[in-house]
Image: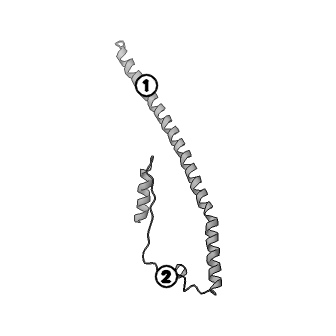
Amino acid sequence: NAPRTGRATIVMDGKANAIRDRITSVKNTGKITSAMKLVAAAKVRRAQDAVLATRPFSETLQSVFGGLIERMGGDTAEIPLLTQREVKKVTLVCITGDRGLCGGYNAFFFNKIDA
């Protein structure tokens, strides 16, 4: 058997360094992803709070319309906002992401809209 040369050791060390670098980069990517999840959770919480803050306005609007209908004797034919009519057109407002890793989210969203 021929003695081993130093060159084989260098190649092995290079592989070890590459594996070590890959492990480090995967760990860093995991940290970034978890930080992004925390930010997204905070944004969702803020949006939920905004929706809940509109509830008093909605209740007030409902009571105003209810009082208006009572004063009119229950006749809603004269109020254009309260008349029931056939739906002819539907408008969708699409709000998508434009930051971070949102490409998959946007694609999923547009596929749902087209369906």
> Is 14 left or right of 30, judged from the image as shown?
left
- Residue at 62 percent across and 80 percent down: it is 68
Residue 94 location (% of width, % of height): 44, 61
* Pointer 1 residue: 17
Q: Secondary structure at mark 1?
A: helix
Image marks 1 and 2: residues in contact by CB distance under 8 Å? no
Nearer to me, 25 or 98: 98
CA distance for labels 1 and 2: 71 Å
Residue 45 location (% of width, % of height): 59, 53
Q: What kind of residue is marked 2? A: Arg
The image quadrant where one finds the N terminus is top left
> Is 32 left or right of 75, judged from the image as shown?
left
Residue 92 location (% of width, % of height): 44, 66
The image quadrant where one finds the C terminus is bottom left
* Above or below, 60 relative to 42: below
Q: Secondary structure at mark 2?
A: loop
- Residue at 65 percent across and 79 percent down: it is 67
* Pointer 2 residue: 85
Q: Residues within 10 Å of mark 2 (few under 14, many from 20)?
A: few
* Above or below, 74 relative to 60: below
Nearer to me, 110 or 75: 75
Q: What kind of residue is marked 1? A: Asn
Which quadrant of the structure image shows residue 12? top left
> Is 16 left or right of 36, judged from the image as shown?
left
- Residue at 48 percent across and 38 percent down: it is 29
Which tag, 1 or 2, sits closer to the chain's start?
1
* Above or below, 48 relative to 36: below
Which quadrant of the structure image shows residue 51? bottom right
> Is 31 left or right of 70, judged from the image as shown?
left
Q: Residues within 10 Å of mark 1 (few under 14, many from 20)?
A: few
- Residue at 65 percent across and 83 percent down: it is 70
